[in-house]
Amino acid sequence: MVFPRRGHASSLRAPTAGFPVSFPDWPTPHSVTVRLQYNPISLELLNRTPFGRRPSFRPDGMRMTHATGKYADFAGLRERAVELRRAGYSLRQIRDELKIYNNDILHRLVKGEPPPTWTKRPNAKDDLRQKARELRLQGWTYDQIEAELGCSRSSVSLWVRDLPKPEPRYTPEEQRALMQAGLARLRATQNEERKRAKESATQEVGDLTERELFLTGVALYWAEGAKSKPYDRRERAVFVNSDPGVIRVYLAWLDLLGVSRERLRFRVLIHESADVDAAHRYWADLADADASVFARPTLKKHNPKTVRKNTGDDYHGCLVVTVARSAELYNRIEGWWSGIVAHAQARLR
């Protein structure tokens, strides 16, 4: 036979017939509901303990919780703490007076009561803050206050953002005029800097040797000239560009290679809306050639929807320079370029 454990719910049941053993009755860890279900007993019996402790169950059968300790009278402690706070006590003084060493309880007791003025320590920049507010009230801007006090803009904003904004010094029209004048001065300064940089770079080039011109021409042709492809063999020197300086360098390079001007053919690529005759005269004068030797120009149809920037008297289209009987010349150009690439690749290793 299995005997019930002492304090088990089964020990509260009435002994069965023929069972001679009885056990004391006192509350057990199991829920009251379970005990009442099997053997309803009185509240007096539930609250009777062998150690004489206070009752643990309410009349409805639920376990009671007791507010014990020195913080049980919270309302009285708060009343006393608020009284001390209003009398000018600090938190440490209230703690020592009421013997409350729990910071959480201490702050809850004085919640909502402002600290005394004498407990507030001054901030490191209180003097700057006061000065910033004075300047703001005088109509100073953030930039002026920042420059005057030597502090950050974020600090200035934090100090004076609650103050009214000063009246603007200038009307919107005056502000735009000042801005345009400032931009004009800035652009003039930038233009002067660009001019000085270009002049200095031009002087750095110095005299161009024949070898330097030769290598320059090879690279220039390989960048802007027509090239033969494995799927489209075109072994002919054809060069196209709209920059007059590039055309001059290319013609000087051809002269260095001994290509006579009689072998050169010229053609203009230009929009049909431009002045074709003026473009012919411009390129003929630049190439030192007669305009009558120019081939029929290639005209690009005008598209009104396109917003073009290359218009006006400075627009002359592109000049196509073709060298007649230039298959050998083209192959040599390709070989020269391969040599340049090989030497450059060796320097990269």
Image (tube, grey):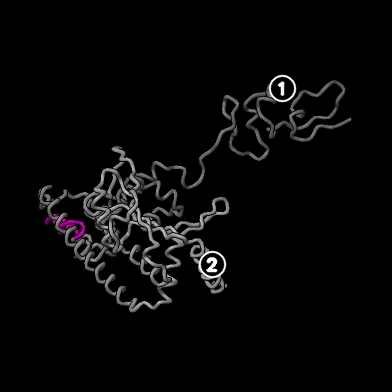
Q: Secondary structure at mark 2?
A: helix
Q: Is residue 13 above or below residue 139?
A: above
Residue 24 point in image, percent of width and height: 74, 32
Q: Main secondary structure of the magenta part?
A: helix
Rendered image quadrant of residue 62: top right
Front-most of residues 295 and 330: 295
Q: Residue at x 65, y 24 (%)?
A: 42
Front-most of residues 272 and 206: 272
Q: Which residue is mark 1?
A: 39
Rendered image quadrant of residue 133: bottom left
The kind of residue on which mark 1 rests is Asn
- Is residue 158 visible to us here? no
Q: Residues within 10 Å of mark 2 (few under 14, many from 20)?
A: few
Residue 137 is left or right of residue 106, and the answer is left
Residue 34 is left or right of residue 209, and the answer is right
Label disc, if present, on residue 335 of the rendered structure? 2
Q: Is residue 181 above or below residue 77?
A: below
Q: Is residue 11 above or below residue 295?
A: above
